[in-house]
Image (cartoon, grey):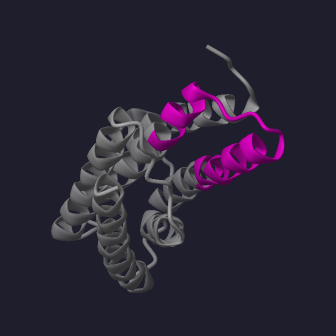
Amino acid sequence: MRLNLPNILAFLRILIAPIMFWLLIDRNNSLFDGIHGSWINFLTAILFVLAATTDFFDGYIARAWNQRTTLGGILDPLADKMLILAAFLGLMLIARANAWIIYLILLREFFITGLRVAAASEGKEVAASMSGKVKTVFQMIAIGFLIMDWRPLGDILLWIALVLTLYSGFIYTFNYTKSIKK
């Protein structure tokens, strides 16, 4: 197991996800007595932005410094899913995100992860598409707005993220089915 900077950044994202989830859902904790909810939102948003930033840098550094590893190929998407799952479930539990939208987004995320595992088991790779990257950016922006409770823009961004999520899921599925015909 080779632990390099990109892998450390992915591990950091994995560690931040449950902390962020806790901050979102456990606002009545005595630790937060006397702290206004907007400050908890701000701290949670800062953690989320930090984690989201590591998502960009771990991939950039791995490519630029030629530090791609098998561990990184597993950790990076796992860390992404853990962060998105923690954020969306937390937001849903505190009633800042529509449960149906969250369900559809998470369903797509798990379905595509399954497709990628299936492709890998066949020795094929379904690489991240531009639509998948745009989807991730919109999901993260929507999450940031919803953590800060900036509505209705956060809700609008979540709907856009849903459309992009479903579209990119279609693209992944199309590319996977095309790759198995070869």
Q: Is 179 in front, or is 162?
A: 179
Q: Is residue 58 magenta?
A: yes
Q: Residue at x 83, y 40 (%)?
A: 65
Residue for point 37% across, 85% down? 156
**Whole-percent x, y for residue 110 in the image:** 27, 49
In what quadrant of the picture does the C terminus appear?
bottom left
Q: Is residue 112 magenta?
A: no
Q: Is residue 41 above or below residue 100?
A: above
The answer to whether residue 23 is seen in the rendering is no
Does residue 12 sit above or below 64 in this rendering?
above
Q: As rendered, which of 101 and 57 lies closer to the eye?
A: 57
From what the image shows, is residue 103 above or below residue 98? above
Q: Residue 2, how many percent across, how many down?
A: 67, 17
Q: Which residues are magenta?
A: 49-77
Name the quadrant containing residue 153.
Answer: bottom left
Please count the marks in the image.
0
Location of residue 134 with respect to 91 vertically, above or below: below
